[in-house]
C-alpha cells in the first residue's frame, strides 16, 4: 500500500464547487406522490441525476446506458433509489419492481443510510472510472453523494457536509453553519488545526480516499471511502475528531 498523499487541492476545490452548483435548483418533491406511493420522475420537470456525471467526468456509464431513479417516501423519511437502464429501456414504476429487477431488498425505513456495495450495484455495475488519483476521488465522491441529491425529513440527519478547503472551513466557523450545538472554545481551537486536505492511498486496483466531513449525528470526522477499480464500493469508515453532542431520535 502506498503512503497517504494529497490530491491536488485546486482540482478538488473546483470539482466540489461545480458539483454543488449542479445540485442547486432541484425541483421540490411533488406532494401528491408522497407515502405510500413511489414515483418515477418524468423526462421534463424532475432532476436529471445524469447531470452529476458532467462534473464527475472521470466516472463513466457504460455506452447506451443512463442513470435513473425511483423516489420513495415513508412516514419518517425519503430518498431516491438509483439504477442504470438502457437509454430506450423501461423505467421502474414501483418499489416491488425495483426489488425484483435488481434483487435488492428495500429497507423498511428510508433514513438516508450509508451506501453499500450491494445496494449500489443497480447502477455501479454499469459504470467505470479512470484509474488515476483524481479518478479514485471522483468515484468515491460519486458513491457517497449520487443518491443523496434530495433527502426528506429524518433522512437529512444522515447527510454529510464535506469541508475540503480552508476557505470553506473558515466561512463555516465564521457563520457557525453547523447543525449542532455551539462548539466549545476547545473545539473551536482544534477545528482550524486539523489537516482537511483530501488524501489517497492506492494498492493495485484498490484505493482509499480520505475526506474531512461533518454529519449531524456523528460530528466531524475523516471519512475514508475504499473503492476498487473499475466500479466497486468496498467500505466506508470514520475517524471521529470532534464528536456531536446531540443525537436525533427517530
Image (spheres, rainbow, N blue to C red):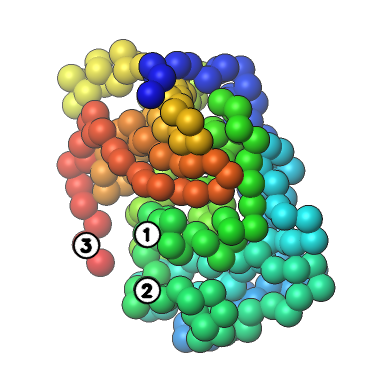
Residue at x 41% of width, y 56% of height? 116
* Direction from residue 12 to residue 154 in the image, left or right: left
Q: Mark 3 points at which residue?
A: 249
Q: Distance between the residues labelled 1 and 3?
A: 15 Å
- Give yes or no for contact between labels 1 and 2 (Cβ–Cβ under 8 Å): yes
Q: What element carries label 2?
A: loop
Callout 2 crowding tier (Cα within 10 Å): few <14, some 14–19, many ≥20: few
Secondary structure of the residue carrying numbered label 1: loop
Q: Where is residue 126 in the image (x, y as percent from the top left)?
A: 64, 58
> Could you tell me which residue is drawn at 42 percent across and 76 percent down?
106
The quarter of the picture where the C terminus appears is bottom left
Q: In this view, does 191 lie to the left or right of 29?
A: left
Query: Are there few (<14), some (14-19), or many (20+) residues within 10 Å of tag 3?
Result: few
Residue 166 x %, y %: 47, 17
Which quadrant of the structure image shows residue 5? top left
Q: Which mark is residue 113?
A: 1
55 over 106 or under it: above or below: above
Residue at (41%, 19%) from the top-left corner? 2
Amino acid at each position: 500500500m502506498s503512503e497517504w498523499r494529497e490530491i491536488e487541492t485546486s482540482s478538488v476545490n473546483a470539482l466540489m464547487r461545480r458539483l454543488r452548483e449542479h445540485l442547486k435548483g432541484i425541483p421540490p418533491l411533488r406532494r401528491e406522490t408522497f407515502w405510500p406511493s413511489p414515483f418515477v420522475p418524468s423526462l421534463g420537470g424532475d432532476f436529471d441525476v445524469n447531470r452529476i456525471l458532467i462534473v464527475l467526468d472521470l466516472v463513466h456509464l457504460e455506452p447506451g446506458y443512463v442513470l435513473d431513479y425511483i423516489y420513495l417516501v415513508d412516514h419518517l423519511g425519503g430518498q431516491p433509489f438509483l439504477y442504470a437502464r438502457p437509454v430506450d429501456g423501461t423505467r421502474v414504476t414501483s418499489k416491488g419492481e425495483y426489488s425484483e429487477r435488481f434483487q435488492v431488498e428495500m429497507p423498511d425505513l428510508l433514513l438516508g443510510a450509508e451506501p453499500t456495495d450491494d445496494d449500489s450495484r443497480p447502477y455501479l455495475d454499469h459504470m467505470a472510472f479512470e484509474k488515476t488519483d483524481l479518478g479514485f476521488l471522483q468515484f468515491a465522491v460519486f458513491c457517497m453523494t449520487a443518491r443523496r441529491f434530495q433527502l426528506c425529513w429524518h433522512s437529512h440527519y444522515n447527510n454529510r457536509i464535506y469541508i475540503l478547503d480552508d476557505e470553506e472551513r473558515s466561512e463555516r466557523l465564521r457563520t457557525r453553519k453547523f447543525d449542532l450545538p455551539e462548539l466549545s472554545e476547545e473545539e473551536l481551537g482544534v477545528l482550524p488545526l486539523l489537516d482537511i486536505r483530501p488524501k489517497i492511498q492506492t494498492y493495485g486496483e484498490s484505493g482509499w480516499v480520505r475526506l474531512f466531513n461533518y454529519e449531524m449525528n456523528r460530528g466531524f470526522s475523516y471519512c475514508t471511502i475504499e473503492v476498487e477499480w473499475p466500479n466497486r464500493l468496498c467500505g466506508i469508515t470514520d475517524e471521529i475528531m470532534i464528536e456531536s453532542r446531540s443525537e436525533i431520535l427517530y
